C-alpha cells in the first residue's frame, strides 16, 4: 500500500470523528497540490532525476474556507516561478467586491447606464438594500483587517504611487486620488502595506498617510520611490528621514517633452548612458556630461537635469543587485493596471467606502499572490539595510 493510500485509510478509520470531513478535504487538496508540483518539477519530492526542471522551496500556509469549515493548507513554493492551486480561486474576493460596488450603486439610484446594464446582465436587478448591506459588511471586515494589520520588521524600500477614480460627493462627481504603498522587507518579500483615498495630494494628506503606516509599525525605511509629488517629498523628509528616489521613467517622459519628436530617441539614448554606469560616482560624472552636452540645444533639459540629479540618481547609492527594481515605480504598474481595469467597470463610485472596498479587495488578493512567489529582491545587501530601530517620526504621534 502506498503512503498516500495508507494515510487515506487512516482517515477513513476515524468514522466518528467530527473533523473527518475537513481532514479528508485537506488530505485530497494537499495531494492534488503535491501532484501538481511534481509535474511542474518533472520529479517527485527528494527524487534525483536528470529530467528535473525545477526545485521546491518550502511551503506557504493558507487558510481555505470551505462549506465544511476552515481547512489549513500548505501550498508548495518553487525556486523558479510561482505555483498557486486553481481550486483556491484567488480572485474570488475581488469579484465579490466588484459585484457589491455595482449593486450598491444600483440600489442607491446613483448608477450610470453601463452599471444598470451590468446589473441586468448579472441577474442582480432583484437585489434589496439589506442584501447589499450584508455583502458589503462581509467584504469590509476582511478588507479592513488587511489594511489595518500590524506592520512588522524593517522595510528598507517603499514604493508609493497614486491612481485616480471618480466618485459622487455632495451631489457632484469629483476625482479623488487612491494612494497605494508597497514595501520590501529585509527578507526580500514584497507586501502591500497600505492605501488611502483623498481629494488632494497636498503635504497634509501625505503626512496623514505616512503617520498611519508608522502607527501600524512601519520602520527602517531607507528609500522611498515615487513620482514627483512635492507634498510627498516634504512628508518623506520630515517623517521618515529617508532618501527619496524620483521615478526614472517619469523623469524621462518629463524631459522629452522639451525635445522635438524627431530627436527624442537620440536624447533618450544619451540620458540612458548615465544609467549604464557601474558606480554612483561614474553615474554622476556622466549625468553632468550629458547635461552639458544637451544644454546648448535644449536649455530646459539642461536646467531640469541640474535640478534633478540627486533625486534621479538616489538609487545608485544602494546595492547594485537591487537597482533594477528600485529606480522607478514600474513594480506598481501591473497592480495599477489591474485596479484601473476593475474601477473602469464601475465608472463612478457611489461613495468613498465603495472605493476602499473594491481597491482594498484587489490589494488583499494581490498581496496573497505575492506571498506565494519567490523573493522579490535578492538578500544580498538587504540585511545591512535593516537597522532594527523604529523610524524616527518626530511628529508621528503628536
Image (cartoon, rainbow, N blue to C red):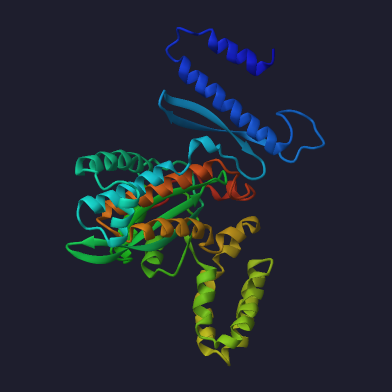
Q: Say which of 356 and 289 sits in front.
A: 356
Provide residue 51's location: percent of width, then percent of height: 80, 37
Would you say residue 55 is visible in this rendering? no
Outermost residue, left direction?
170
Would you say residue 89 is visible in this rendering? yes
* Count of all numbered marks drawn on residues in the image: 0
Say which quarter of the image contains residue 365: top left
In the rendered view, tell whether residue 255 sits above or below residue 341.
Answer: below
Q: Say which of 122 and 207 sits in front.
A: 122
In the rendered view, tell whether residue 240 sits above or below residue 262.
Answer: above
Q: Quadrant of the N terminus?
A: top right
Position of 41 with respect to 24 (left or right) is right
Residue for point 42% across, 50% down = 391
Provide residue 215's location: percent of width, then percent of height: 34, 46
Position of 127 with respect to 33 (left or right) is left
Position of 313 with respect to 141 (left or right) is right
Residue for point 24% across, 66% down = 173
Amino acid at each position: 500500500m502506498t503512503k498516500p493510500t495508507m494515510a487515506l485509510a487512516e482517515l477513513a478509520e476515524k468514522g466518528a470523528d467530527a473533523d473527518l470531513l475537513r481532514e479528508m478535504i485537506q488530505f485530497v487538496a494537499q495531494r492534488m497540490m503535491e501532484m501538481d508540483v511534481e509535474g511542474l518539477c518533472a520529479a517527485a519530492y527528494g527524487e534525483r532525476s536528470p529530467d528535473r526542471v525545477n526545485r521546491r522551496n518550502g511551503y506557504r500556509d493558507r487558510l481555505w474556507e470551505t462549506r465544511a469549515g476552515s481547512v489549513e493548507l500548505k501550498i508548495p513554493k518553487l525556486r523558479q516561478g510561482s505555483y498557486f492551486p486553481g481550486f483556491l480561486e484567488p480572485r474570488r474576493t475581488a469579484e465579490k467586491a466588484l459585484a457589491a460596488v455595482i449593486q450598491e450603486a444600483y440600489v442607491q439610484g446613483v448608477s450610470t447606464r453601463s452599471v444598470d446594464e451590468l446589473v441586468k446582465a448579472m441577474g442582480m436587478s432583484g437585489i434589496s438594500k439589506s442584501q447589499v448591506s450584508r455583502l458589503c459588511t462581509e467584504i469590509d471586515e476582511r478588507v479592513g483587517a488587511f489594511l489595518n494589520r500590524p506592520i512588522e520588521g524593517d522595510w528598507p524600500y517603499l514604493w508609493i504611487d497614486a491612481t485616480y477614480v471618480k466618485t459622487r460627493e455632495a451631489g457632484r462627481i469629483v476625482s479623488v486620488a487612491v494612494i497605494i504603498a508597497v514595501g520590501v522587507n529585509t527578507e526580500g518579500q514584497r507586501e502591500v502595506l497600505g492605501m488611502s483615498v483623498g481629494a488632494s495630494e497636498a503635504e497634509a494628506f501625505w503626512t496623514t498617510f505616512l503617520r498611519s503606516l508608522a502607527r501600524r509599525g512601519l520602520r527602517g525605511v531607507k528609500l522611498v520611490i515615487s513620482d514627483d509629488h512635492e507634498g510627498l517629498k516634504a512628508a518623506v523628509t520630515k517623517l521618515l528621514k529617508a532618501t527619496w528616489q524620483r521615478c526614472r521613467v517619469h523623469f524621462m517622459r518629463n524631459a522629452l517633452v522639451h525635445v522635438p519628436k524627431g530627436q527624442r530617441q537620440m536624447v533618450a539614448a544619451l540620458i540612458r548612458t548615465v544609467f549604464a554606469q557601474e558606480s554612483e560616482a561614474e553615474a554622476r560624472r556622466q549625468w553632468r556630461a550629458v547635461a552639458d552636452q544637451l544644454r546648448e540645444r535644449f536649455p530646459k533639459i539642461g536646467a531640469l537635469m541640474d535640478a534633478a540629479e540627486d533625486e534621479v540618481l538616489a538609487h545608485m547609492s544602494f546595492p547594485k543587485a537591487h537597482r533594477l527594481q528600485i529606480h522607478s515605480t514600474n513594480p506598481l504598474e501591473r497592480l495599477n493596471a489591474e485596479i484601473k481595469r476593475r474601477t473602469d467597470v464601475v465608472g463612478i463610485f457611489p461613495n468613498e467606502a465603495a472605493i476602499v472596498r473594491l481597491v482594498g479587495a484587489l490589494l488583499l488578493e494581490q498581496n496573497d499572490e505575492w506571498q506565494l512567489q519567490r523573493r522579490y529582491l535578492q538578500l544580498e545587501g538587504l540585511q545591512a539595510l535593516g537597522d532594527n530601530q523604529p523610524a524616527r517620526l518626530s511628529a508621528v504621534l503628536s
